[in-house]
Image (spheres, rainbow, N blue to C red):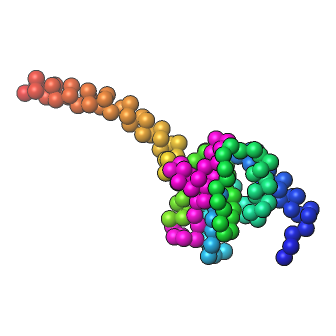
Amino acid sequence: MAISKDKKSEIIAKLQGALKEASSVVFVGFSKLTVADASRMRKELSQAGVRYFVAKKTLLRLALKQQGYEGQAPELPGEVAVAWTLDDVTAPARGIYEYGKKLKGAVALLGGVFEGAFAGKDQMTAIATIPPMPVLRGMFVNVINSPIQGLVIALDKIREEKAA
């Protein structure tokens, strides 16, 4: 069914608003995705602060062209959706990547926009494997704590030897 001109301009405006406010954008390819899986994915992405919108590729390309991102847009075969967030720049890629592993072949990363430039599938997959910020903070604390912990263990061993 054809979309009216008003509806198209409304969709382009929504996409432009999303692209302006987004810290990162992921292009999602989906096929053979059941309604139940799509609903579950939308709900989990929403809980992680990620927004998800399905749009026609021509309308998406128009909105992207008007944003003026650097580089060349990745190839967008098949049905395409857009996932974006305002906060955690890795959350959209990570969420879609995880769902791609769960639903084998039904959902896939096609590329995205990261730091004002287009990124290909491989770059977005690499970004998706970056742990979330709380995990990174925990890893950092562990790195800082490790030498101190080693010193405490060494001092305890010296104490044990002197006590014996």
Q: Position of residue 73 (x, y in %)?
A: 67, 53
Q: Quadrant of the N terminus?
A: bottom right
Q: Is residue 47 visible?
A: no
In the rendered image of this protein, does residue 94 appear above or below residue 36? above
Query: Which quadrant holds residue 148?
Result: top left
Residue at the (66%, 74%) spot, across then down: 35
**Does the magenta portion include 155?**
no
Is 2 left, or right, of 74 in this rendering? right
The segment highlighted magenta reads 102-128
Q: Quadrant of the C terminus?
A: top left
Is 108 left, or right, of 116 in this rendering? left
**Does the magenta portion include 113?**
yes
Q: Residue furthest front?
A: 72
Query: Which quadrant holds residue 94?
Result: bottom right
Q: Position of residue 157 (x, y in %)?
A: 16, 29
Is 70 left, or right, of 109 in this rendering? right
Q: Is residue 16 visible?
A: yes
Residue at the (61%, 49%) spot, across then down: 119
